[in-house]
Amino acid sequence: MAIVHRPHGVTPERRNTSRSSLDLPGPRLGRPPRVSLAAAVIALLTVALAHPALAADQAAEGRWVAAWHGSPTPGGTFNSQDCPSDVGLSGQTVRNIVRLSAGGTAVRVRISNAGGAEPLKVGAASVALSAGGATTTAGTSQPLRFAGQTSIVIAAGGEAVSDPVALKVQPLQTLAVSVYLPAKTGPATQHYFAAQDNFLAAGNQTGAGAGADKQFTRKISCWMFASGVDVKATPNVAGTLIALGDSITDGYLSTKNTNQRYPDFLAQRLASRKGTTLSVVNAGIIGNELLTVRPQLQFGYPVPARLARDVLTQPGARAVILLAGINDIGDRSAKATDLIPVYQQIIQAARAAGLKIYGGTLVPFAGSTGTYKGDYGTAKGEQERQKLNTWIRTSGAFDGVIDFDKALRDPSDPSRLLPAYDADKLHPNDAGYQAMANAVNLDAILGDIAKGTSP
C-alpha cells in the first residue's frame, strides 16, 4: 500500500515560527515530567477498557468523530512572548483558531489540563464560527456548558468534554474556541507549535464577536487549554483517521495560517470524496520521540505514554498512521533494534482497540546535522533510518505501509529530500507535505475499515 510519509525533529536552535535559522534562548523549564513504564502500561490498559464506552457513546448520541485535535503538552516555551505557556494565564481569555476536518450538526469541545500539576478553574468558554483573525461570525457564538454549568474545575492531568452544542459546521470550516481563565493557572497545558495565530485578551471575552480584534490584541503561536473538537458527523463519515508522530506530522515549517500540514492535505482529499469518508486529526508534536522524555516540556511525552489519550480513545477512532523515530535516531543515536519493539507494542495496542494501523517510512534527512547536530543526517543516523525503513516495509507488522521516504526522496541522492520538497534538509515544505498526503492510499484504508470490525 502506498501511503503517507512523515518525520521528525525540532531543536531549541530553531524557532517554530520562522523558516530562517535562529539562535533561541533555552526553554524555561518547570519540574521535569515523570513517565514510567508502569504508567504507560496502565494508560494502554485504560484504553482497552475505555474503547467500548466510545462505541456506546456513538450508539446513544449518533456518530461522534474527532474533527480537530492538538496533542496537549505541559507548559514550556522557547519564547514567552510568543507562547506564555511557561507562566500561564490569569484573568485572561485565550481564543484558539482551529479548522475542522469533518462537518456535522453539533460540536463538543475538549478543554485540557493534561499538563497541569494543579486543578484548573475554567470560568467560561465558548465556540463560534471564525470570521478571520480573532473575530467571529455574527449570531454563531455559543457558550459551552459542562453538565449544564458554564464553569468547571478540571483535575490535574485531566480534561473536560463540553455538553453538545447545536452548530451546523462544514468540512474544513474554521472555529474560534475561547477559554476564560479567571485565576492564575500556573504553567499552561498547550500545543506549542500551532502554525496558526491565536489570541489573548484581558478579562472574560468569550462572547466577543465582530469587534473582537479590539479586545484580543495579543497574538500567540500556541494553542492553549483547548485540545479537541468533536463533531456529530454526517452519515457518510465512517470514523476518525489519526496521524501520529513528531514535527513532520505537526507541520513544522509549513506556511503559517494556511493549514498546509500533511494531515490538512489529507483532510482536503477526504472532504472532496463522494460517498464514505473519514475525519482526520493531527496527533503530531514537534520534537517528540518514541523512547525519551526530552527536557523541553513542549516536546511532550513519548508516543507510548500518550497513545491512549491522543489515539486510542479519540471519538470514532478507526485507523492511525504512525510516523515516528527520526528524533530518537537523530537526538539519541537510537538503533533500529531499540525502536522496533516500541513499534510492535504500539501496533498491538492499536489492534486491541480495534484500529487499523499503517506505518510511515522515515523521510530522508542527509544534510540536517549542521542544524540539528547529533546523528541527524549523519552516516550513522542514515544507516539506522534505512534499517528501520526496511523493517517497516518488509515485516508485515502493519496493516499497510505508506512510503513517505519514496515519495519525498531525491532520485539522484536518496539520502536527501528532493529539493522541490525540502524546507531545511529534515522537514518538508508545503509542497512536500502535500506529496506526503498524496502518497496515502485512502481507498485501501477505507476498504480495510469496511472489512474490519467496528470499534
Image: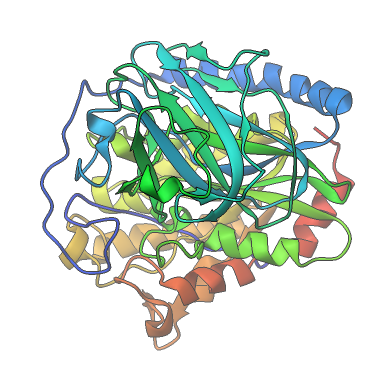
Q: Write the residue at 23% across / 31% down.
A: 86
Q: Quadrant of the N terminus?
A: bottom right
144 or 28: nearer the eye? 144
In the rendered image of this protein, does residue 349 appear above or below residue 429? above
Q: Is residue 214 left or right of residue 101?
A: left
- Quadrant for residue 170, please give it: bottom right
What colour-coding does the image apply?
rainbow
Q: Is residue 52 shown to the viewer in this render?
A: yes
- Quadrant for residue 128, please give it: top right
Q: Position of residue 399 (x, y in %)?
A: 70, 50
69 or 287: nearer the eye? 69
Q: Position of residue 282 (x, y in %)?
A: 54, 48
- Quadrant for residue 181, please give it: top left
Q: Is residue 137 left or right of residue 226?
A: right
Q: Is residue 276 left or right of residue 417?
A: right
In the rendered image of this protein, does residue 287 appear above or below residue 263? above
Q: Is residue 77 left or right of residue 429?
A: left
255 or 322: nearer the eye? 255
Q: Write the residue at 19% across / 54% down.
A: 374
Q: Position of residue 409 (x, y in %)?
A: 45, 77
Q: Is residue 345 shown to the viewer in this render?
A: no
Q: Position of residue 348 (x, y in %)?
A: 63, 33
Q: Write the residue at 33% across / 66% down.
A: 426
How many marks do you count on the picture? 0
